[in-house]
Amino acid sequence: MLYGDSMRRTSEGLGRNMQSCFRCFTGPDFKGDDRSPCFDPVLDTEEFPSRACLGGIRSNILFPT
């Protein structure tokens, strides 16, 4: 299964062009955020989080609509 833009070669940052991301939850039991996946500039990263995620980590893959 393919997702995203196969011609993309550089990171576009958070937002509409982000195709996959990791969410680093700050609250207990996957809590601590209220934004859509891959749209939180503080909790979402394109690479695996380098800091401790006390509430857990979620991997998101956004498929084109």
Image (spheres, rainbow, N blue to C red):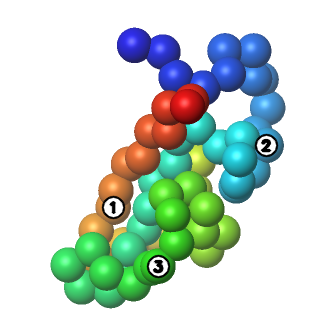
Residue at 47% from the left image edge and 79% from the top image edge: 34
Question: Residue 4's x, y, as percent?
Answer: 60, 26
Q: Is residue 55 above or below residue 60?
A: below
Identify the element where label 1 is drawn: strand
Specify the quadrant that holds the C terminus: top right
User: Callout 1, which amino acid?
Assistant: Ile
Q: Earlier in the sequence, mark 2 or mark 1?
A: 2
Which residue corresponds to mark 2?
Answer: 12
Residue at 46% from the left image edge and 53% from the top image edge: 22
Question: Residue 25's x, y, as percent?
Answer: 38, 74
- Displayed quadrant of residue 54: bottom left
Tell me the distance, in whole angstroms, between the alpha carbons under discs 2 and 3.
22 Å
Q: Is residue 4 visible?
A: yes
Which residue corresponds to mark 3?
Answer: 34
Horizontally, residue 44 falls left or right of residue 18, namely: left
Residue at 77% from the left image edge and 23% from the top image edge: 9
Which residue corresponds to mark 1?
Answer: 57
